[in-house]
Amino acid sequence: MPDFASGAVWLSLLTLTFLEIVLGIDNIIFISIASGKLKTDAERKKATNVGLILAMVLRIVLLFGVSFLVAMNESFYDFDWGWFKGGLSGQAIILVIGGVFLLYKSTSEIHHKLEGDEHTEGDPGVGKSVGATLQSVIVQITIINLVFSVDSILTAIGMTNGLEGALLIMIIAVVVSVGIMMAFAVPVGNFVNRNPTIQMLGLAFLILIGFMLIVEGAHLAHFEVFGSEVGTVPKGYLYFAIAFSLLVEFLNMKVRPGPKEKQVRLNTYSEEAAAPTTDK
């Protein structure tokens, strides 16, 4: 048990809680974008809450399996092709797959929001998208939660290394941070879905995060290309870019002239589902 009379314990708990919230920003962005494909507000709220609860459960499970998670950093397959070498590990594979998944989903969403879905030639009603099911959205959220949970727990372990009662401190920090995120996730998601430029920024952020996860996975695998080892991307740079971009967009929203109706409109799944189809 940690000594809660110690200031160091409370400082570690507050710092770790804040860090978990910051690291959860990318999770909230993905959940907001994914749940935005659902047709009703009730489904979107349910998907958001379920997604965050899953994030909390996965983090706590991984905390109890810390030894297994740390062991996943050990290479199980080493290769040396001369110009390219490294060693594959469980952590590296999870991060790389998660990064590729984020790149794919973000690019697909950008295409849909700007271009819409293609229809069968001669019948505009055929092939029209009617959004996603609640189950499919929750599956997507679960997949990306696993990736974000691994990244988050590895950071937490590094911060509390050597501290007595570190496991309980990390669990409390995870529960408190997820509770705070649940209180703000729905309003944040509604705000994102109401503002087209914020939606596009969110998708751009997910592309950055996907690239960062791939690079971090390559770094954990100690990939070397032409004698140069792949480094890691400091998360501070990424979050500064996100915060600066959001600040610029908020300023633009304040000074943007004209009525809101003149905004660029993006394709949304809920509007497509409500729109009547044209039969031959």
Image: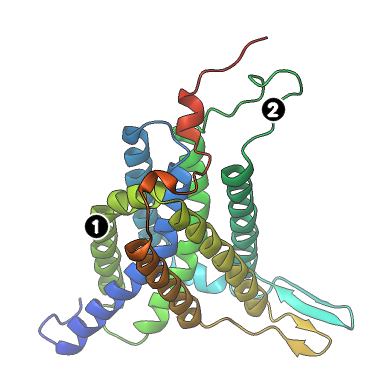
Amino acid under disc 2: His
Q: Amino acid at mark 1?
A: Gly
Relative horizontal placement of residue 110, taking residue 43 as reference (left or right)? right
Left or right relative to 84: residue 109: left
Which element carries disc 2, helix, strand or loop?
Answer: loop
Q: In front: 190, or 184?
A: 190
- Please give the name of the residue rendered at 40% of the width and 73% of the height, measured from the top-left corner: 243
Q: Nearer the viewer, mark 2 or mark 1?
A: 2
Up/down of 57 relative to 134, above or below: below
Q: Nearer the viewer, residue 126 or 212?
A: 126
Instruction: Say the numbered circle drawn on residue 179.
Output: 1
Q: Which mark is residue 119?
A: 2
Distance between mark 2 and mark 1 Cα atoms? 42 Å
Above or below, comparing residue 162 to residue 202 in the picture: below
Q: Quadrant of residue 80?
A: bottom right
**Residue 95, labelled with which disc?**
none
Residue at 55% across, 62% down: 204
Q: Which quarter of the figure has residue 11?
A: bottom left
